[in-house]
Image (cartoon, rainbow, N blue to C red):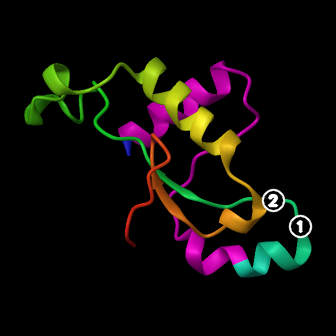
Amino acid sequence: MDNLLDLHRQLQALGSGMTVFAGTPAQVSPELASSKPHAVLAGVHSGTVSTALSKPFKGGQIGRPPQQAARDVLQTLNALQPANSGCFVAYDGQPLPW
């Protein structure tokens, strides 16, 4: 949960107006589309971020700083269209399997 909280704080610091939550976009997106057709609900994997959570797994060596991870996620989210709602992608926009 620390990774999500760190990412959420970074997105807010960048003034994105976006939020991060734990959930299943594939289940929620059809309902959202009926009430907000221009909205996009997507799962984005941040990759390895250099935080206390990833430290035991060499996150400090292989991860990206939280600020960079937030920028990557924000760039990926900004590229998504309503047709992408319900997708699961990596921080670089590559599709991931559910």
* Residue bearing the label numbered 2: 39
- Report whether 90 appears left or right of 39: left
Q: Secondary structure at mark 1?
A: loop
Label 2 CA crowd tier, 10 Å (few <14, some 14–19, many 20+)? some
Q: Secondary structure at mark 2?
A: loop
Q: Which residues are magenta?
A: 2-29
* Residue bearing the label numbered 1: 36
Depth order, front residue of 58/96: 96
**Which quarter of the rendering shows the C terminus?**
bottom left
Q: Please name the amino acid that badge 2 sits on.
A: Ala
Q: Is residue 28 above or below residue 43?
A: below
Where residue 86 appears, x then y in whole percent?
61, 70
Q: Is 12 a magenta residue?
A: yes
Where residue 47 appears, x then y in whole percent?
33, 41
Where residue 26 appears, x then y in whole percent?
57, 76
- For the point 44% across and 51% down, which residue is it? 94
The label on residue 45 is: none
Q: Are marks 2 and 1 in contact (CB under 8 Å)?
A: yes
For residue 25, what is the image quadrant? Answer: bottom right
Q: Please name the amino acid that badge 1 sits on.
A: Lys
Q: Is residue 80 above or below residue 13?
A: below
- For the point 36% across and 19% down, which residue is it? 65
